[in-house]
Amino acid sequence: MKVLVINAGSSSLKYQLFDMKNESVLASGRVERIGMDSSIVTHEPVGKEEVVEVKEILDHITAVSRVIDMLIHAEHGVVKSMAEIDAVGHRIVHGGEIFKNSVIVTDAVKSEIRRLFELAPLHNPAHMMGIVAVEMNLPNVPQVVVFDTAFHQTMPKTSYLYAIPKSLYKRHKVRRYGFHGTSHAYVSDVAAKVLDKELASLKMITCHIGNGGSLTAILDGQSFDTSMGMTPLEGLMMGTRSGDLDPAIVPFVMNKEELTLNEVNSMLNKHSGLLAVSGLSSDMREITDAMDDNEEAKLAFDMYVYRVKKYIGSYAAAMNGLDVMVFTAGVGENSVVLRKAVCEGLTFLGIELDEELNAKRSKEPRVISTPNSRVKVMVVPTNEELLIARDTYNLVK
Ligand code: AMP
């Protein structure tokens, strides 16, 4: 069975085609600047040369049609016809409290996703455009939706409720949902397999640190707590997001600076984090490259690391112990210096990093702690697309 995985954003659409016989990727790519004058399609067929095409793509329906054209193209294609695409899996950011697992798309599922637009106004409407675009292009192909929030639906009330009037939860479902669930689920599963242990027997913290970042405490094989909240703004300091702050700052700043709701939202989501503190960049590479002779970049790095450490400490306390800590995503997988800084001073928890193993580059999941370390520290490259392809395959087959 061949499964096409789609991650549709408001002006972009990423895709990967999997052959589920051996879970191999046949092609991947992206369409960028959808709806703008010169859209860019980048198609990477495995074993063939990359193709980049610039042309007008005004909507998601045309974008999906271009993706299919590329996949079946005589020269750049990887399948003979679109009849070879057996199923499509979509990444959906917000599944609310309704979706605790991945599901096959039906009319009822679509209306639930539409009802969730208000919880993820930047993401869910774009995902829905992706679903509709596939329906138009591949009318009889089953579609599956895989939610970033689903893995965290096991959190207990003590983790997911906020200490605010109950009516807000009852009326508007204001609660912690958590995100990056597909990634936390994938890397925790791989980590347990590499260690040859049952996931349910391990107290684990998975650190998904990329442009956005979240930590998850995994107990009894399930998400027990996670640092992102009702939206992806809560928790760690991120590339451009503030992460945790005193909520009273919001009305105070709105009043002093005469900001609208949209402006304050944009300030906290797009103009804060590493970018704001360093005044330089939201990209961790640029921060670590600059920090030896740039005090603000160093401060941004130190604040970022400090916040990761605080969450690790609090989750270890929440679980009354820690067996495994996993780094993943762009920063977690690649930044030797960040991993070292996070692990430094955590020997009281039983964390001892092996600096040589930490410095080694590899695309494989691996342990980077010393044999004596009571906590196994690991790097596990995430692969959200593969998990989406697996869920799609399992539901459709
Ligand atoms: P992601 O959101 O998981 O795609 O991660 C993207 C982020 O990973 C970028 O913003 C970079 O800051 C970061 N990144 C990628 N490679 C490196 C690296 N070698 N060192 C530090 N950060 C990196």
Image: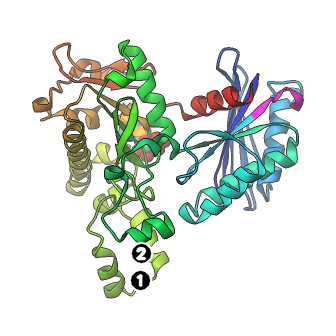
Which residues, given as a range, are shown in magenta?
A: 82-87
Q: Which residue is mark 1?
A: 259
Q: Which residue is mark 2?
A: 264
Residue 144 in which image quadrant: top right
- Which residue ends up furthest to the left in the rendered image? 348
Quote the CA–CA distance across marks 2 and 1. 6 Å
- Does any portion of residue 187 appear in the rendered image? yes
Amino acid under disc 2 = Val
Amino acid under disc 1 = Leu
- Does any portion of residue 11 appear in the rendered image? no
Q: Is the residue under label 1 in contact with that under label 2 (CB below 8 Å)?
A: yes
Q: Earlier in the sequence, mark 2 or mark 1?
A: 1
In the image, residue 26 lies at what x, y percent?
A: 71, 24
Total marks in image: 2
In the image, residue 129 lies at what x, y percent?
A: 73, 55
Q: Residues within 10 Å of mark 2 (few under 14, many from 20)?
A: some
Residue 109 falls left or right of residue 119: right
Residue 311 falls left or right of residue 284: left
Q: Quadrant of ligand 1?
A: top left
Q: Tell me if residue 301 comes above or below residue 88 in the rendering.
A: below
At x 33% / y 69%, what residue is drawn? 164
At x 73% / y 44%, what residue is drawn? 105
